[in-house]
Amino acid sequence: MDVLQHAPALTPADASQLALRLFGVKADASPLPSERDQNFALLTPSADRFVLKIANSTDALPLLEAQNAALAHVSRTSTLCPRVIPTVNGEAIATVDTSSGAHHFVRLFTWLPGVPLGTVANQPPALLDALGAAVAELDTALEDFDHPAIHREFYWDLARGVSLCRELAPSIADERMRALVGGLLDRIEVQDAPRFARLRRAAVHNDPNDYNVLVDLRPAAELPPEGGSYTSPNHVASGFSRKITGILDFGDIVHSYAIADLAIAAAYAVLGKPDPLAAAVSVVRGYQRQRTLEDDEIAALFGLILLRLCTSVCVAARQQRQRPDDEYLSVSQGPIAETLPALAALDPAAVESAFRLARGRTPEETLAARRRVIGPNVSIAYRRPVKIVRGWMQYLYDESGRQYLDAYNNVPHVGHSHPRVVRAATEQMLVLNTNTRYLHDKLAMFAERLTATLPPQLRVCYFVNSGSEANELALRLARAHTHRREVIVLDAAYHGNTTTLVDISPYKFNGPGGEGAPPWVHVLPLPDTYRGKYKRDDPRAGEKYAEFARYVTNPSAFIAESAPSVAGQIILPDRYLASVYAIVRAAGGVCIADEVQTAYGRMGTHFYAFEAQRVVPDIVVLGKPIGNGYPIGAVVTTREIAASFDNGMEFFSTFGGSTVACAVGLAVLDVVEEERLQDHAREVGAILVDRLRDLIGDHPLVGDIRGSGLFLGVELVKDRATLEPATAEASEVSNRMRERGILLGTDGPFHNVIKIRPPMPFTAEDAEHLARTLADVL
Ligand code: PMP
């Protein structure tokens, strides 16, 4: 049966007359769009508004009674839905007979303000979040509603969706769409149908599509006082109200899966969006703030969203066969054809986890909570902070499911959440996690594997929990070995957050809040051949910079990053470290290489940055990448220095070298080797440097491109002759890159160097994408 043949066909004048006769409302009537019923907007002379609804003649009275009962039920706790206004005789439903002999039921409803969501071109995450919250409010209001007429066989019921689609899919005219829907149905039947069977059921509206949802788009200033706070889920304080004011049309009400409304609202909300997953996550987040989803529901949600869109395609295909000329029938088909393939290509497991994570606070709430309980100088990146809820390899994902290319974090060296590392940690944690006071094979195994990557002089390991702790220990080793205190450092260096390390970090003691260098700390000029005294065209720049070390006559230690990162992604000039090391050793000091940022193949050409300088340090300090995010620090030194440190005082770090740390450390080394990440960094880094160098011609801001492997810097200057640092511009670039989904940072003494040091799985395509985006932003 084609219900559209049974749609009423009244004129606006007929509607006006009906309103007056049945409801005593004197008003002008104008038609509202509808598929199977006829709806009229009524406007009275006193500017009151109503909606007159004349039902399809196939609509049975019990179902209309059920709709009215549902509306009355909802109105007890929510103002989202219209209320029924009885006739002058007190009937909720009147009857009219048309001249063609058809029998129609007529109802009058209160008017809800707003425009259909489907007509709002700009649908930011906050609006979709509000949609989710409104649907949750409706579902909560319907929770304890029931009526015999809603237990019905209905082709839009998702609980029947699979069999309906199976029946209708062959009639889809477009071959590619037919194949897509067929494939999705196969997947849904195998993977999702068993989950559907476990879902709780309830009365649902069953059609909160974007034309049944109303939005108030007034400027926030015109809103009632409650509109404009983040605490109210239907509002945001962002200039314009994003209030969802109504959910209309209970014509599809049915007893079905309790999450059907969420699935349906999300199914339409994602259409035509550049990032459909992010749109769906916004809806799901808003929903979950109001109403808790069960585990099975989250697991089934994506399948139901796909099933609703498949149902829409199938039903439209059938109707198009029946009425090939009716354009109204296909309004949503264009957007579905556009978006369904993108949804089908998503990994269902990733979608499920994005939905699961979408229960948290909004970024604004997170920020406010953090400000209340975390120290104020624990800094946050970017003008508009990013809230990250998930990581995978070189990508990070925010609470809306948006993907960011991580071009900044060198801690997750082998990739965020690398499964090998996660498995190693989990499996070890399930069995044992204890300290170095007991024998365990993994401690020695990790130390053996680690020292095997280093020159043969460096064979003794100490494990700690951070780069700072490792540098502290390195200083203690140096002092124990030399019985001296003086330390030589490079300008603009950072070595860690402890009292002593702030004392040897010019980046800190010469920066805001710093108190200058203590008397036992000696600062050498940064051997920066772009900005410093000796430039790249000077073949002896390395030796010349090294000469400054001669001024310190009784050093305990020289400590430097083998490629200074915090100081601005500096590549040291040839022979620099060899010359300084020679001077320091001749003066009785030891040489510490801080490889916290640069180790494990990042430089592409070598496993450690000091190797590129052809030196062997006396102490190597390791941190960040060696635990891939699990806190591991390590100090590796010579037998002689270790012997000096063994002066009777025990060394113990509670968590350092714990069983889990060693399991993780071994897994990271396995991955670095098996995935040939050093070679990969060399290859991809070369491509990235090439693309970045192309920027120099077109963008006067770009002063210098430098680096090695996946350790790169882009120095921005206002003037290539004076090298005046473009500090504000660098910050602007990094903020705009963040808006475009690429995470970078700035560093260097003037904060004008854009730092690129991504997780090592970063690909050539990522490099091209980064360079293209950077060119755009510049
Ligand atoms: N050394 C260097 C070169 C670093 O960059 C850092 C951290 N940025 C540290 C040491 C200190 O490491 P952590 O923060 O793990 O203590």
Image (cartoon, rainbow, N blue to C red):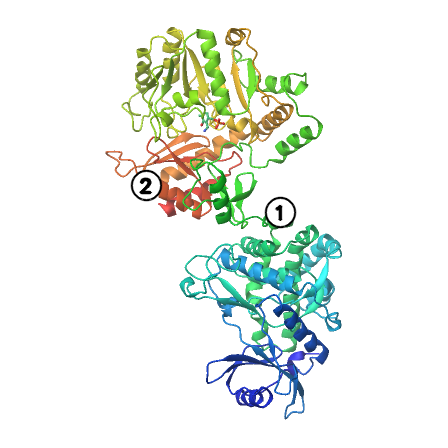
Q: Is 72 situated left or right of 462 in this image?
A: right
Asked which secondary structure carries label 1, the reply is helix
Marker disc for residue 353: 1
Between residue 704 and residue 503, name the one nearer to us: 503
Q: Which residue is mark 2?
A: 728
As measured in the structure, the alpha-carbon distance from the residue carrying label 2 to the one carrying label 1 is: 38 Å
Q: Is residue 267 visible?
A: no
Q: Is 602 situated left or right of 308 in this image?
A: left
Q: Is 319 situated left or right of 535 in this image?
A: right
Name which of mark 2 and mark 1 comes first in the sequence: 1
Q: Residue 464: image x %, image y %?
A: 55, 21
Marker disc for residue 6: none
Say which residue appears at 27% left-offset and 34% top-offset: 723
- Residue 753, relative to residue 658: is it above or below? below
- Residue 107, relative to residue 571: is it above or below? below
Say which residue appears at 43% left-offset and 46% top-offset: 384
Number of labels in the image equals: 2
Asked which secondary structure carries label 2, the reply is helix
Q: Is residue 685 visible?
A: yes
* Amino acid type, residue under disc 1 in the picture: Ser
Q: Residue 19: image x %, image y %?
A: 56, 87
Q: Residue 281: image x %, image y %?
A: 57, 53
